[in-house]
Structures are given as structure tokens and as C-alpha cells.
């Protein structure tokens, strides 16, 4: 069976009419693995499964991997945890994340407690507490089952603990950059992979944004030109841009041109929500 990669959300903090915040889904052998969970990810998960899921439903999603703790990668976690539980789900959503993930999950469950406790005690059926075990991410191999293995590589995203992931299945190697500035580990560890899912901002779009933004983007994100330079060295079979930040009226086409200018000549796609690669 072939591995499917679906882009659930491809945007950055900015939610757009046709793009929600960052999230990806891998489907392999009827199992679902979600990477990041920004605002809108739950709805996109339901849409993706209706379209490509072969009968799978969102309650079957019980593996969530978080690259880092920025809200545009985590805002929809309450929905993923609570809505299926409200409908009777008893199994756990297992979460792998950086330090602080357990605390965030505790706070989420606490924040919704008035409503969830009422449902648990007086709802149409007696329910277990919401189960969301949190597992730490360590560098290197941190998760493996019969379908897939996940390896983590530390990247450079400001002051946060942040990771790139390499997901390996029987037929695909998919590398997720997470949010990061250019780092050598991606050039090395994404070497020859099938799909490099890479964050990118349009350098040309920085011309009209405030200086503090320019400084910040240069420090913690990767420009189209830098993506081109990195991808030329990593030589993946396909680069999928996501988390595209095109300001000052620039477009996806400008961003893709920057990747070309950076020296990458291989297959290139600017990712859109609900796009599938299989
Ligand atoms: Zn982000
Ligand atoms: Zn971030």
C-alpha cells in the first residue's frame, strides 16, 4: 500500500480564505499520523479523510507529532482532543512534542473542564476522562511502529526547542523542515528524500515590512532563495513549499522563482491545503 501525504494546512500564523495554519497528515496502512495542528487543522482532517481516507474517520487519528510550540502549529489541539471525545471516543490521542507539551495539554484540559466535566458526568453516556498521553521528543529515532518511523533533528527557530522530522515508511521518505532558519542538518538528513516539505518566506516581500519583522524573519525562517540553496544540496525528489509568507503583494510565483534563483532545479510545488502526494 502506498503512503499518502496530505497537506492539511499550509499557512503561517495568517489564516487565509483558502489556507489554514500548519498541519500535515500521513496515511499508511489505514493508520493516521498528524504532524502539527494549527488553527483549522481538525476541519481539514475531516475534509481530507472524506476525500482520500477510504472510510477512515477523524476519531482514528491517534498519533500527533509537534515540531515546536508556536501557536500556529498547536492552536487546534483542543478541538482534536475534545470534539471526538464528546462524541464517545474512549481511546487516547498520543502526542509527541518538545518540552512544555505536557504542560500545554494539562492547561487545555483544565481550560475546558467546566464543559467537559458536565458532559462526562451527565452526558448521554458515562465517559472516561479525556486521554492524551504526552511523550517527549528526543533527537534521532523517537517513534516507530509497524508502519512508520519518525526521527527528529534539532533546527534553529529562535528561542524555542524546534525539530525537523524525517518520516520513513516502506515506500517513502518524507522530510518536514518544521519552522527554521537555514540549517545544515536539513541539507544532510533530507539527502535524496522523496519529499522535502519546506517552510519558506518570500525575500522580495520583506521590502515593505517593518524592520523588526525583517530582522525576525531573517533570524528564524528560511527565504525562498535559501530554500533553493539548501534544496540544491539536499537533492530531494520533490520540494513542497508550505507556511509560505508572501508579504508586500508578492505571490507564490515570486517565491518559487526565488527557489530557482537559489539554485534548485528539481521538482517543485508550492503547497495548497488538501493537496495529496502518493
Ligand atoms: Zn509557524
Ligand atoms: Zn514557529
Image (cartoon, rainbow, N blue to C red):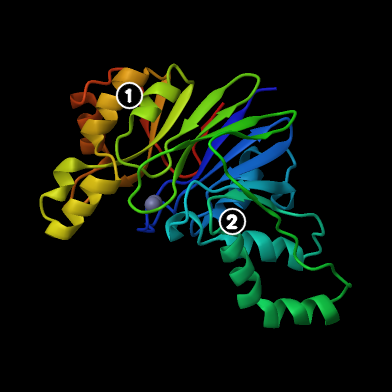
Answer yes or no: is residue 163 visible.
Answer: yes
Residue 180 placement (x, y as % from top left): 35, 42
Q: Which residue is mark 1?
A: 231
Q: Quadrant of the N terminus?
A: top right
What is the C-alpha distance between the residues marked 2 and 1? 30 Å
Indicate which disc residue 42 carries. 2
Q: In the rendered structure, are the residues bearing label 2 and label 1 in contact, judged by CB atoms less than 8 Å apart?
A: no
Residue 237 placement (x, y as % from top left): 43, 18
In this picture, residue 191 sits left or right of residue 4: left
Residue drawn at x 37%, y 17% is 235
Would you identify the image quadrant in which residue 125 lies? bottom right
Answer yes or no: is residue 190 visible.
Answer: no
Q: Which is more foreground, mark 2 or mark 1?
A: 1
Of residue 48 and residue 204, the one placed in the foreground of this image is: 204
Of residue 202 and residue 252, the one placed in the foreground of this image is: 202
Residue drawn at x 50%, y 62% is 75
Residue drawn at x 58%, y 44% is 137
In this picture, residue 103 sits left or right of residue 72: right
Indicate which disc residue 107 carries. none
**Circle 2 sits in a helix, a strand or a loop, which is it?**
helix
Amino acid at each position: 500500500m502506498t503512503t499518502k501525504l496530505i497537506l492539511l494546512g499550509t499557512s503561517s500564523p495568517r489564516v487565509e480564505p483558502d489556507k489554514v495554519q500548519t498541519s500535515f497528515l500521513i496515511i499508511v496502512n489505514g493508520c493516521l499520523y498528524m504532524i502539527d495542528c494549527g488553527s483549522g487543522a481538525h476541519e481539514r482532517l475531516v475534509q481530507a479523510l472524506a476525500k482520500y481516507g477510504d472510510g477512515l474517520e477523524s476519531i482514528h487519528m491517534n498519533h500527533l507529532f509537534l515540531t515546536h510550540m508556536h501557536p500556529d502549529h498547536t492552536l487546534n489541539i483542543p478541538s482534536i482532543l475534545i470534539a471526538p471525545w464528546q462524541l464517545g471516543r474512549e481511546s487516547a490521542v498520543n502526542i509527541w512534542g518538545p518540552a512544555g507539551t505536557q504542560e500545554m495539554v494539562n492547561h487545555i484540559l483544565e481550560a475546558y473542564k467546566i464543559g467537559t466535566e458536565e458532559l462526562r458526568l451527565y452526558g448521554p453516556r458515562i465517559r472516561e476522562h479525556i486521554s492524551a498521553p504526552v511523550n517527549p521528543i528526543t533527537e534521532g529515532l523517537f517513534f516507530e511502529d509497524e508502519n512508520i518511523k519518525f526521527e527528529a533533528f534539532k533546527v534553529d527557530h529562535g528561542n524555542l526547542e524546534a525539530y525537523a522530522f524525517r518520516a520513513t515508511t516502506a515506500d517513502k521518505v518524507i522530510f518536514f523542515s518544521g519552522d527554521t532558519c537555514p540549517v545544515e542538518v536539513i541539507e544532510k538528513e533530507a539527502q535524496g528524500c522523496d519529499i522535502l516539505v519546506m517552510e519558506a518566506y518570500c525575500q522580495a516581500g520583506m521590502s515593505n515590512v517593518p524592520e523588526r519583522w525583517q530582522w525576525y524573519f531573517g533570524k528564524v525562517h528560511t527565504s525562498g532563495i535559501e530554500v533553493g540553496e539548501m534544496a540544491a544540496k539536499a537533492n530531494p525528489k520533490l520540494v513542497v513549499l508550505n507556511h509560505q509568507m508572501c508579504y508586500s503583494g508578492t505571490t507564490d510565483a515570486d517565491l518559487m522563482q526565488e527557489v530557482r534563483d537559489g539554485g534548485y532545479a528539481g521538482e517543485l510545488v508550492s503547497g495548497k491545503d488538501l493537496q495529496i502526494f502518493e
